[in-house]
Image: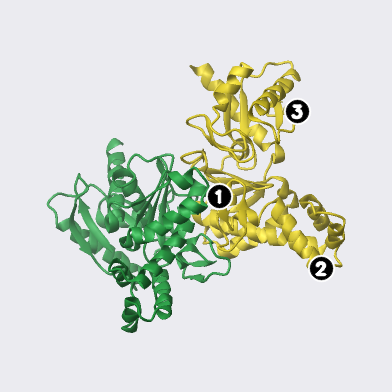
Chain colours: A green, B yellow
Amino acid sequence: MLAGVLDADLGIRSRVRHEVGGLSRPELIDVIVATVEEARRGVADEPVAVGIGVPATFDHAKGRVVRSTHLPLIDLAIEDLLAERLGLPVVADNDATCAAIAEHRAGAAVGVLNAVVLTLGTGIGAGLVMDGEVRRGAHGAAGELGHLPVEPDGLNCGPGCPGRGCLETRVSGPALEREAERVAIARPQSELAKAAANGPLRGARVVELAHDGDLAALEALATVGHWLGTGLVAIANLLDPEMVVVGGGLAAAGDLILEPARAVLRERAMPPAALEMEIIPAKFGADAGLIGASLLARDRAARDRAR
Amino acid sequence: MLAGVLDADLGIRSRVRHEVGGLSRPELIDVIVATVEEARRGVADEPVAVGIGVPATFDHAKGRVVRSTHLPLIDLAIEDLLAERLGLPVVADNDATCAAIAEHRAGAAVGVLNAVVLTLGTGIGAGLVMDGEVRRGAHGAAGELGHLPVEPDGLNCGPGCPGRGCLETRVSGPALEREAERVAIARPQSELAKAAANGPLRGARVVELAHDGDLAALEALATVGHWLGTGLVAIANLLDPEMVVVGGGLAAAGDLILEPARAVLRERAMPPAALEMEIIPAKFGADAGLIGASLLARDRAARDRAR
């Protein structure tokens, strides 16, 4: 869990980080409250409101978590509960939606009417901007691009998703690691193979080796990029946005992953989106969720003042 | 081309139909004008405006056709040109978008905030309603669900689409006919095989045989329904609508195609949409485009009056 107090220019002051994996619900809530209080103590000014991005399906209308794979938050009215504990207005939203709000209102997609903001990490998060607003769907579950079925005989997707052949079985940190292990075996003379001999290949290490020019590491990234391109074809044909913004840990690979993805887009999607849809790196990186949550908190404070 | 004059209750009066395949652009425009004039002569009242749904990518902001596979309309400012010829205000939109507007404002999805309206015929058309409005994307090209990549080694898609393994290579009239030919060979004793021996199998005949209980025809429809289910998984996970409305020629198969599709949705999509997303037949069938275009024409006439 990452917390921060943001100033008027979206500068992050008083950044605090705590591990929240494996906690029970009461413990998790205590840690959230303690982390926010710690961040709050780090600045002289009092915050006006708290925004929180949760890695869960969040029903914006009801203010409740409706689905949560990694944290014990299901059916929690998280806004009311935290507002009570913190003594401040609290607004919550899905973390990928927060990232999309940050990039759309203050980052790489400012002024763009239709955009998709991707966060490529252990999975794929996406926020959908259509006609100038983030669209959340009926339950706040829209934008699960990682669970697009792209391969009929693909891998089972894993915890929280009953699908198989989902895009994130091909495009994610774990997918890159699987692909790198496969290439390392096929190319035993490569730097990638040498790294694999010393223990499990981490995605970040594969990206480093690729930046150093190792052909095997480049091949693994190109394969992941190719599959990302399939996701871009789906986005172009189904949503027709002006722009796709790509952030998250895997985005560190930059054009090593984005160029193969763009090539598939240009070749396979329908014109005019195939040629005109821009694929650009995110502005805020790992801070996008924090910044988007803060923007939602500002909106909430402004609405409260207007009452 | 189907034309009609609609009364205040959306009743279709003076219905006219003309073939427009194979015409040059000037001939096509002449036929459009003549068809509208013929429909207009069939009623005593003068229409207030004309709406037209075109099977092409239509840029709503610019009033121009930006992509057209089947008709010679590319780059045509169709609204201005027809308004000049007809002496009435003209508003155009994509035909699947018109169908979505009809079902959303007066049909099966009235009052639903998020809905996808599918037209299953020679291809798949789709209109996307999110947060209460039809969303068209940057170029009016959103909703090309037929061109979702679902099969990496699938068939080349064909005219107008450079993709392969697109959903409509598995879900469409031609896809049903291919599947039925395959099943007919595998089941030579079936009614389907007997029908296939008398010439190419038409989709409508396959649906008839299935309604009569032929197991081979049922199998072909179930396979198409299974692939439609893959499309529903993509819709649920990416857009999270309350409802998917299914119309078009293939919808005549009803639950023979929708039940296998629902089964895949329930099994493979992520909750809560997997369980809660409704799949229902369209209200207006083949008239949905006409009714949606008429609703757009009414909007246009009301705006003109308000000026």
Q: Chain of mark 3?
A: B
Q: Which is more N-terminal, label 2 or label 1?
A: 2
Residue A3 screen position, x and y as percent: 24, 59
Q: Which residue is mark 3?
A: B16
Side of B60 relative to A89 (left or right): right
Q: Do discs 1 and 2 belong to a common subunit?
A: yes
- Residue A141 appears in the picture as rendered: no
Q: Which residue is mark 1?
A: B242
Q: Amino acid at mark 3?
A: Val
What kind of element bears circle 2? loop
Crowd tier of the residue under label 2, counting other residues whose Cα lies within 10 Å: few below 14, some 14–19, many 20 or above: some
Side of B12 relative to A288 (left or right): right
Which dot marks residue B196? none
What kind of element bears circle 3? strand
Residue B104 screen position, x and y as percent: 59, 39
| Dots 3, 1 in contact, CB < 8 A | no
Comparing marks 3 and 1, which lies closer to the viewer?
3
Above-or-below relation of A57 to B75: below
Crowd tier of the residue under label 3, counting other residues whose Cα lies within 10 Å: few below 14, some 14–19, many 20 or above: some
Q: Which is more N-terminal, label 2 or label 3?
A: 3
Above-or-below relation of B238 to A203: above
Distance Cα–Cα, label 3 vs label 1:
35 Å
Q: Which residue is mark 2?
A: B187
Q: Residue at x 59, y 20 (%)?
A: B83
Q: Quadrant of the N terminus of chain A?
A: bottom left
Residue A235 screen position, x and y as percent: 48, 51
Q: Amino acid at mark 2?
A: Arg
Distance Cα–Cα, label 3 vs label 2:
42 Å
